Amino acid sequence: MPLSFCIVDDDGSARRMLQYIIEDSGIGEVIGMADCGQDGVRLILSERPDIVLMDLLMPDQDGIETINTLQAQGCRSKFVMISQIENGDMVGRAYRSGIEFFIRKPINRIEVEAVLHKVNERYAINRYLDEIKSSLEKLEGLQFGAAPLPVVKRTVREILQPILMNLGMIGESGSRDIIGIMEVLSNREDTGSLPPLKELYEMAARTYKENPSDIAKESKAIEQRLRRALSAGLTNLASIGLTDYGNPKFEHYAPLYFDFEEVRLKMKEIEQGKETGKVKVNIKKFLQVLYLELQEGMGR
């Protein structure tokens, strides 16, 4: 079922362009548009869209005020902020209000599609987790005195997807490789330290390749996808840290999964607006920490 969108922006051409991109790319359907915050509140409370694209600066009230008003009235839509400014304080306020991502103006189709695909994936995961929670609540509500319910064990995917989502990596192809590696590791009797990275990549490649030369090629491809995924996660956390150093997500995940020097250099790159090529992600540390989190989630 396609996602429903509402767009709130005082720029008519921006609204039309966003509607075209959303519907032409098959991401979803635009069910309503408004040109100011007050009309946007009425529209969104009436239509209850899955996703709202909200302009940061509008004549009557800014996008953050509009989101706060909506949430105070029980709105559960997901929000994506549209902005042509990159003021750190404003960006920090926007994230604290509960937005998912930013789309910068002038609007670029490639950026809009990339952001909305990630929002789509996150929405689907949250909906899946809500369904699981609802099912468990129904089981807990069975007649008093019935036989104790068996312990429901979570799968590797169910444990890791929320972590990868919080790291901003769930939309990367390497996230599937990470889950695949952890699924292989979860079946090992040795639950201690990880084997060498090369061996890990080969173990994952063997799950769907048989020819030795294909396994070798796929192992290298897995390593490249992992580096890109970890780089995306590091960039996401560094961006959060720049806007709000006390953000709980940044405080928890950044030092846990990445080396402090990596995070510091990436924050400096983002601040200066240029890549130095000096940031090298520590794949072994990342996988080791994630493996420990997986073992804890599986009750080992």
Image (tube, helix red, strand yellow):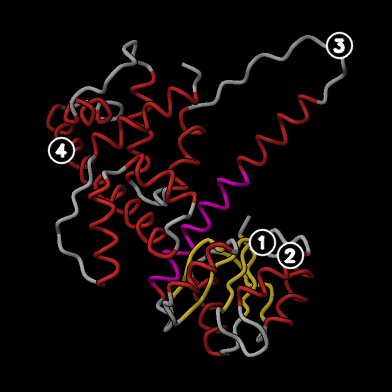
Name which residue lies at 22% across and 31% down.
Answer: 201
| Helix, strand or loop under label 1 | loop
State yes or no: discs 2 and 4 in contact (Cβ < 8 Å).
no
Residue at mark 3 = 145
Label 4 crowd (10 A; few <14 / some 14-19 / many >=20):
few
Name the magenta segment's main secondary structure: helix
**Residue 112 lies in the magenta-colored region:** yes
Any mark on residue 217, and which? 4
Q: Amino acid at mark 1?
A: Ser
Any mark on residue 77, and which? 1
Cα distance in 3D space between marks 2 and 4: 47 Å
Vertical order, 236 against 26 (above or below): above
Cα distance in 3D space between marks 1 and 3: 39 Å
| Helix, strand or loop under label 4 | helix
Cα distance in 3D space between marks 2 and 1: 7 Å
Residue at mark 2 = 48
| Helix, strand or loop under label 3 | loop
Q: Does label 4 or label 3 sit earlier along the sequence?
A: 3
Name which residue lies at 28% across and 52% down.
Answer: 263
